[in-house]
Amino acid sequence: MPAPGQWLAVAVLSLSGMAAFGLAPDTVLDTVPTLTIERALPRPALPDADAADTTYWREERVRRGDTIGSLLARAGVDDPEAMQFLRTDPAARPLYRLNPGRPVHVATDADGELVGLRFHTRAGEMLAIERHDGAFRAESAPVAEDVRTVLRSGEIRSSLFGAADAAGIPDAVTVALAEVFAGDIDFYHDVQRGDRFSVVYEMRYVDGEPVGSGRILAAEFENRGVTLRVFLWRDADGEEGYFTEAGRSARGAFLRSPVEFSRITSGFTRARFHPILQKWRAHKGVDYAAPTGTPVRATADGVVTFAGRQGGYGNVIFVRNQRTYSTVYGHLSRFAPQVKAGARVRQGETIGYVGMTGWATGPHLHYEFRIADVARNPLTVALPTAPTIGPDRVDEFKAAILPLADSLVLARSLPGAALAATD
């Protein structure tokens, strides 16, 4: 090691303003002049490895199959007293619910004893464990979150979830995206290869680490050559909802499907051979095949007029949606707890679960859409129009969505890419 004050020689190339590029063969370069500069540099102070108060912080990522013991051992912790505290103190219990990929910050002293620990819990709090005068103390406190706006886009090759995964979009955002467009698109039957989507949404961060997704602020979906766009907006009643550029509610009066990502096994027809009755008769609804227990959602706001067992329907729910519209949900395995005659239900709310009660040969939902008590085909009938933003707020709405519309254009121009900015 050089003695303090030793002279160091540095050769500096006088190539100011030049960058490194590949050179064509047989290129001849002039001799590059060099300049030697000598400067006395002070010796840097080295940390005292023997200092009793030396603390080493280290970040460890939770691995699949990790226990708190294996994680701390990997961080260099050799402290039976600390492990006993973590096993027995109720405040430290969140440490035993570890998600792979999540960071844990660990501080140790020179002897490998635990000095401190920081962990962001599932409840959205920061668990801090510290050692004071030889005793441990655990405390949890809310943390300040940094909300960032993220832009992503994708193209469907096989399914919406496959494309969203490829684009790095969280599952919660993908589900919300499907719900936003549920009034216009049946995501099991309408989506096809080559459809594109762009989405602007919120992500929450703590100490630079993502801790969860937030709201979708704007979204665009190109389905079969038709482009739909929606924007988040707070209406006159103070409720947030999604609206098109023209100010029409994206929620629509009715959803196209009462079951997400299912398949149709029997459509609306005037003549179908009944598998149980063994004769031809009309099938006045649509059957959606899904595993027993799959949630069934109300396709529109309404009032339950009947919830119970009735003939071939088995367990069935009848909902009066508007003055002339009503819907029927049959063959259910069970009802949602709040569903009973006279109860009000909201569009998208789970009202029951798929089953095979009544005249059913397998688990599925029988869904009917009626106008003036006459069954109509729910896949082709013209649905009621959605509410729109009042004329007194249209200008305010259009001004508010302009930045979001620009963000969608930017996301669409960078297919497969993502941008994030702190609000």
Image (cartoon, rainbow, N blue to C red):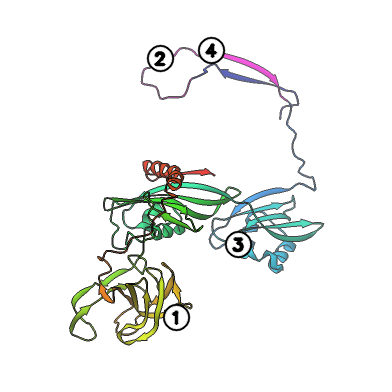
Question: Which amino acid, by three-letter code, is at mark 1?
Answer: Lys
* Residue sitting nearer the eye, 216 or 137: 216
Provide residue 186's location: percent of width, then percent of height.
Answer: 32, 62
Identify the element where label 3 is drawn. Answer: loop
**Magenta stretch: helix, strand or loop mostly:** loop
Q: Earlier in the sequence, mark 4 or mark 3?
A: 4
Residue 287 lies in magenta, yes or no?
A: no
Question: Which amino acid, by three-letter code, is at mark 2?
Answer: Val
Using the rendered image of the protein, determine whether residue 168 is visible from the camera's viewpoint: no
Cβ–Cβ under 8 Å for marks 2 and 1: no
Callout 1: few (<14), some (14-19), or many (20+) C-alpha neighbours within 10 Å? some
Q: Which residues are magenta?
A: 18-41
Marks 4, 3: nearer the viewer: 3
Q: Which mark is residue 340?
A: 1
User: Going 45% across and 74% down the picture, which residue do you hit?
Assistant: 344
- Between the residue at mark 4 and the residue at mark 1, the CA separation in whole angstroms equals 90 Å
